[in-house]
Image (spheres, grey):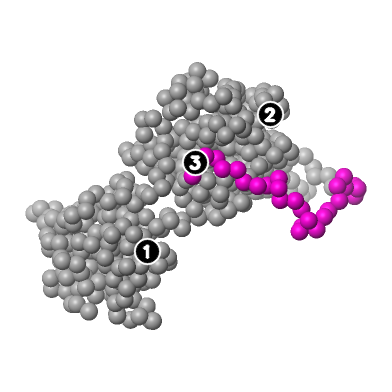
Amino acid sequence: MARTAAKPAFRCTECGWTTVRWVGRCGECQAWGTVQEQGAPKLKEVRAQPPIKGAVPIAEVPTEASERALSGIGELDRVLGGGLVPGAVVLLAGEPGVGKSTLLLEVAAHWARAGRRTLYVSGEESAAQVRLRAGRTNALADELYLAAETDLGTVLGHVEQTNPSLLVVDSVQTIATAEADGSPGGVTQVREVTGALVRIAKSRGMAVLLIGHVTKDGNIAGPRLLEHLVDVVLAFEGDRHSGFRMVRATKNRYGPADEVGCFELVDAGINEVPDPSGLFISQSVAVPGTAITVTMEGRRPLLAEVQALVSTTGPQQNPSRVSAGLDRQRLLMLLAVLQKRCRMPLHTQDCHASSVGGARVTEPSADLALAVAVASSYVDAVPEGVGRAVALGEIGLAGELRRVPGVDRRIAEAGRLGFDTVIVPASLQTGLKSYTQAGVTVQPAATVMDALGFLGFPGRRRG
């Protein structure tokens, strides 16, 4: 007698993957705790219902209810696209200790000082602990209300009682509801809590700021659906050994998704950094092994300094390759290109490379600056052209310089900060002929060999 195949009785709530037995981790999307037992599917006919409010032409939809309101922190408004939209739900995620709570407490205080009622809900700290931090950072305001709650129903009750125009929840992983299964922070709980907060935000026209946790690999904790539910997703980044912080938009329904805001974490709270380029430059006098480049963080050009130290490898030792704030694999590739194309015997040299100020420089446009820093340290000298020059360009395996995006904005930023020469990849229009732009001399170069020659490195061909 033929045995009938078992029907799938368990289904992943995230991606729909099915299995005949329960497993803790989905075999398709690799999410934990999302496989649930399902009954036999029942298809029901859905009958049409008369709408309460008819559809209207899109041009006749009023826009007054969606006018932005400034948060009081210019760098955050820049990332949001001009301010907070009523009814918008913003998720701010970052590593522990990066300053998420400090930043949003500052936002809540500025919002309340403008006469708009604000509710700050803390699920991780007591009310006394938040009050202590608010006193240290001068984030006290009459219209700022504080509640320490972890139950969703109680949080919604506070919203009904205080009627705020801004709600801050710290954090969404600590809030739970008895209507859903699982522990606080689990997939089901986070989904239900976020969905309820999104519904109340849209119905009341209330802006909501959510703080989210991240996993050890840097992803936002909880289901991927969490990022789909909210309107804006912001990533709060920074090195714990440096006070510099960056807020980067990864999703924004109301503005650009490639904007970046800069902050500095200090003892008295967190400060805006409208012009952060100076934080990544160590000194104005050039020394061997240093080079300046301009990176693009979103649409914002930032000056960055890279440093390299080349020294002779000890006897019977393998040459070491160490990088900090730079991509090590790209460093290895550049060293091979310099040895092959520029005839630098780096196979007998130790090479240490680093960025300045805790910046993480991973953009390929910094290749030429890193090559200049390595060459300067190798010859242990600062050629005449390096002192006030900025190097831009991606280096290929053949030693050619490839074009990088946003060259005009990078050149303008270099000129604004007083640099007089910019080395850029040559294009078909200009060839190797220099020209003036934004008050600086722009020198195109076709190869890394040409660029080193233009800067005056000994033994290198000049253009």
- How many residues crowd mark 3 within 10 Å: few (<14), some (14–19), many (20+)? some
Placement of 58 over or under 140, stated as above or below: below
Q: Quadrant of residue 404?
A: bottom left
Disc nearer the start of the sequence (1/2) = 2
- Left or right position of 419 against 207: left
Q: Position of residue 414 (x, y in %)?
A: 32, 61
* Residue closest to the eye, 377 or 214: 377
Q: Residue flagged by tag 3: what amino acid is it? A: Ile
Residue where numbered disc 3 is placed: 73
Residue 228 lies, in percent from the top left, at 63, 47
Q: How many marks?
A: 3
Predominant SS of the magenta segment? loop
User: Which amino acid is tagged 2?
Assistant: Asn
Identify the magenta region: 47-74
Disc 2, SS? loop
Tell me the distance, in whole angstroms, between the alpha carbons under discs 2 and 3: 23 Å
Q: Label 2 belongs to which residue? A: 163
Report how far apart the C-alphas of labels 3 and 1 lie in the structure.
26 Å
